[in-house]
Amino acid sequence: MTTPLVVVALIGLPGAGKSLIARALAARLGLHRICRDTIRAAMFPDCAYTLAEKRAAFRAVLTALDVNCALGRSSVLDGMTFSRRAELAAVDEVLRPYPVQPLPVFVDCPAEIARERVSLDPHDHPARDRSPALVDAVLARFEAPPPGCAVLDGRLDPDALVAAAIALVRARIDSGK
C-alpha cells in the first residue's frame, strides 16, 4: 500500500509559525517544502516586494506544486499567508487532476504575538519585508479560512506547535482521507 499524497497549505499571519511548521514537516515527515519566500528571493535578488514579484513567485509555487504532484511527492506550502481564499482556490485548481489530499491548516495566532515575533526575526529570513506593519497589512485583508480547515494554536511554544502539526498531518496521512 502506498502512502497517500498530501498537500499542506499553511494559512496565517506572518510570525504565526508557518515556516517553523513547514520545516518540521519536511524534516520529520518527508514533505517537500515549497517556500514562496525562498523562490521570490531566488527570482529577485534585489526584491522590492512589489505585487508583480509576489505574483511571479506565486506562479512559480504553483508550478513547483504541479511538478511535485506529478512526481507523486507530498508537499507543504510555506512563505505565504493565504490571506485570500482565491489563493487557496488556485492551489485547488493545480491539485484537481491528482489523487491528493489537500490539507489547509490555519495557524491561529493573535496579531500582537505575530507582531512581536516578526520584530524578533533573524535578519536572514528570506522575506526581508517582514515587520509589524506587514502583519497589520495582512490582517486588514485576511479572509476567514475555509470551512472545515484544520486549526493549530499559534500561541503554543514552538515545540508544542510542531508536535501538534506533525500529529495532525500524520493522522491525515494514516487515515488516507
Image (cartoon, rainbow, N blue to C red):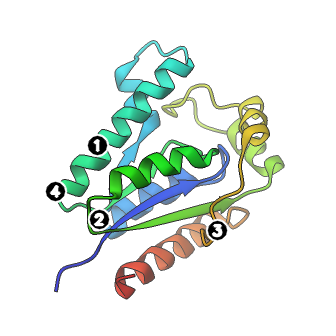
Disc with the residue nearer the chain's start (1 vs 4): 1
Per the image, the residue denoted by label 2 is 30
What count of labels does the image hold? 4
The amino acid sitting under disc 1 is: Ala
Q: From the viewer's perspective, is the residue at label 4 or at label 2 nearer?
A: 4
**Counting other residues with Cα less than 10 Å from the Cα at mark 2, is it few (<14), some (14-19), or many (20 or more)?**
some
Where, by quadrant of the figure, is residue 148 drawn? bottom right
Q: Is residue 82 above or below residue 48?
A: below
The residue indicated by pointer 4 is: 71
Residue located at (68% from left, 39% from top): 118
Is residue 110 shown left or right of residue 35?
right
Cα separation, mark 1 vs mark 4, equals 11 Å
Relative to 60, say whether 11 is above or below: below
Which quadrant: the C terminus?
A: bottom left
Q: Which mark is residue 64?
A: 1
Q: Nearer the viewer, mark 2 or mark 3?
A: 3
